[in-house]
Amino acid sequence: ALDRVDRAAFFTRFNEGEAVPYFYEPFLEAFDPDLRKQLGVWYTPGEVVRYMVARVDKALKDDLGIADGLAAENVYVLDPCCGTGAYLAEVLRRIAANLEGQSLGALAGARVKQAALERVFGFEIMPAPFVVAHLQVGLTMQDLDAPLADDGTERAGVFLTNALTGWEPRTTKPLPFPELEEERDRAERVKQETPILVILGNPPYNGFAGMAVDEERELSEVYRMTKRVRRPEGQGLNDLYVRFFRMAERRITEKTGQGVVCFISNYSWLDGLSFTGMRERYLEAFDAVRIDCLNGDIRKGGKTPDGQPDASVFTTESAVGIKVGTAITTLIRKADHTPAKDVGFRNLWGETKRQELMATAEAEPDTIYRNIEPVLPLGLPFVQTATSDNWFDWPSLPDLFPVSFPGVKTSRDGFLVDVDLDQLRTRVADYFNATLSHQEIARRYPAVMKTTARFDAHTVRDALLKRGGPLDAGFIRFAYRPFDIRWLYWEGETKLLDEKRVDYRPHVFEGNLWVEAREREAKENFSRGTLVRHLADNFGNGLSSYFPVWLKEEGIGNDGDGVRSPNLSRTAQRYLKCLGVSVEDLFHHILAVLHAPAYREANVGALRMEWPRIPLPGWPDGDAEGAAKALATSAARGRELARLLDPEAPVPGVTQGPLRPEIATIAVPATNDGRNMTGEDFAVTAGWGHSGAGDVVMPRQGRIVERAYKPDESSAMGDSIATLGESTFDVYLNNRAFWRNVPATVWTYNLGGYQVLKKWLSYRERSILDRPLKPEEVQHFTDTARRIAAMHLVDALTR
């Protein structure tokens, strides 16, 4: 059968790079998917490779003054994670193109071959792509009419080695085969003796590489230290690509003294709080920093700012590719070094970003990049950060309310949290029933008897059985998600709850108000500011912080009414005293600010980087004319929002009749035949959620039908349609029953990191809830949709 293959056509397309994405990557996925995931192996699209090589060549010529660019005999090039050799092949083609203008005639091939043998290097740690890289370089040289000798006397500079080690002289251990020792020694001569001027490529994309060891540990340590910027937070510096960046930076800035680094990588480092030291160092170490932000983050919805599809640049016809957003970074260091003051930045979005890269490959930097000056208090982000001019004059939320608490984390939600109190009581009673063995409890409720590193299931249950229970006071209301209040069994002893927050609970009492916020918004659009009155879970990925209006002075362990004091800083106390307003006025002003569209839009960049800052009239002295009136007006709007945000508070005209005309037509329960709902009509079976690993409930697409407003709806809603959206949805429980007329902005509304209505439905799928909805639960969805619509209409007044 192989005799029927057109070998010339096959190798022509192989040499053009077409075989690799359609053969090697799927092969590795099938052959060893764990290894592929572990090392973050992804084929780089040809357009990306050609663009990066072109930008490096231009930087050599224009920024470093090397007229021949990559063709110059003093330009040594390294791809430290060369994979199948795409960058190496493109560099050699670029060298050949640069030589065309030198009238070398028949000598051009010898110059390109010299480069392939002596100046263009690739390191690869995996044997299979290492072999393919040699093949691809060899075929490229044939295509350039400069073939390598096939007798073994000439080999491409591609070495099987760990690119992150061996850069300094060391004592090495003998290897089992002399060929491997020779390979290691050749690679280390390149690392230790060659004045590398260009390092480019596509480092591995494994965000869970674990802690580095030995020589690798030192690579990221330097980024953990800062001079002026805030210290790094989180675990991002453990990512493999960071180690490759540090290896390249050190080689260019500390060894060669000048050069170019060009990597495509995860884009988290551009503004993540784990990478503040990394960004600070690059501004000091390089003369120019240029960023092509390719976006394409599937985790953030995979949409452009105007809602169009925004796939990863790595997406191919055969695979989705990398799911995180990516960016091409070009770092330039001149021999006569001057630290960079700004960053050249541009965004590329949508399905044509590869074409945009190719169209601008030779463009002048000032025609494609916008210069941005990284803001020190925000951690020197290398992205555009929309921020009000007086943002840093405003106090942050902790500057006003100094005490906050992280949310409760049970790690056993399926057992300890429930919509139905009776169901929860039954489970907990079984757990405390000493006549039921551990094995029987594990059979009935596997999650609560699964031992983990932080939870010894048998030891915990034994301790609680010995003490006795359950405690009646442990069954409490629990703000599980925005607009989704459930029941929690709370235990202050043992690790039955993973993070029980014993210091938080005493301050949860009747009449206290809390607002949820984060120091950094994980998603593009700010969605914090949930009002809660109960103990609360963490909303979205990571930790929520809950800021109370009042604190119980007795603190932990107080069982009486106690004396409450305002949760205010001294500066905030003086400010409120000068204005003659209360702490609850301040709280409701904060709520109004956090939900104001104009505030969110003007400060979207800053809100992604630090605590919300709150504009206050006359801050900090409170002596500005009209300050008290302005704050009182804002607080009144905040009180209106508070009633709408509290699912347990009736709101006349919205959840309590008579309803406002523009509200009454929203989310009306209906059936296909116009008859009343009955029996199975109350069951959610439209595919809104399913059980994932452990207790996790994962959302699904469900069934919605987008449509135009009907005449009676348009007439009733009037001008509010301009705010609520020009289209609406019918949202289905099942094949027969649905909520009629859920306006677009209501359906897509996000709070606490969730699409509120869709998230609520995902937990109510019959296969998860194990029963149909109750009429009052159907009404709760309706009421929530109407609350959200009313909030949009209140917010519209602040635009």
Image (cartoon, rainbow, N blue to C red):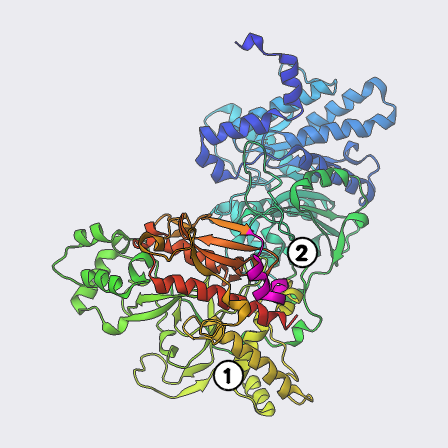
Q: Nearer the viewer, residue 91 or 368?
A: 368
Q: Amino acid at mark 2?
A: Phe
- Disc 1 + disc 2, Cβ < 8 Å: no
Residue 499 in percent (x, y) is at 36, 64
Instruction: Return the mark for residue 584.
Output: 1
The magenta-colored residue range is 707-724
Q: Secondary structure at mark 2?
A: loop
Identify the residue at horizontal 62%, vertical 88% (top origin).
628
192 sits left or right of 427 in the view: right
- Give yes or no for residue 339 being in the magenta stretch: no
Height in image: 568 above or below 108? below
Q: Position of residue 713 (x, y in %)?
A: 55, 61
Q: Quadrant of the C terminus?
A: bottom right
Q: Tell me where residue 710 appears, x and y as whole percent.
A: 56, 57
Cα–Cα gap, marks 1 and 2: 38 Å
Horizontal relation, residue 170 to residue 599: left or right: left
> Is residue 590 in view from this perspective?
yes
Q: Is 471 placed above or below 705 here? A: below
Q: Mark 1 vs mark 2: which is more N-terminal?
A: 2
Q: Is residue 518 above or below residue 348?
A: below
Viewer-proximal residue among 615 and 263: 615
The residue sitting at the left extreme is 435
Give the prevailing secondary structure in the magenta stretch.
helix
- Dot 1 crowding, Cα within 10 Å, few <14, some 14–19, many 20+: some
The residue where tag 2 is placed is 382
Residue 546 % position (x, y): 46, 71
* Residue 482 visible: no
Residue 70 vs residue 692, the one in the foreground: 692
> Taking 787 as reference, is 93 left or right?
right
SS at badge 1:
helix
Under mark 1, the amino acid is Glu
Q: Residue at x 25, y 61 (%)?
A: 423
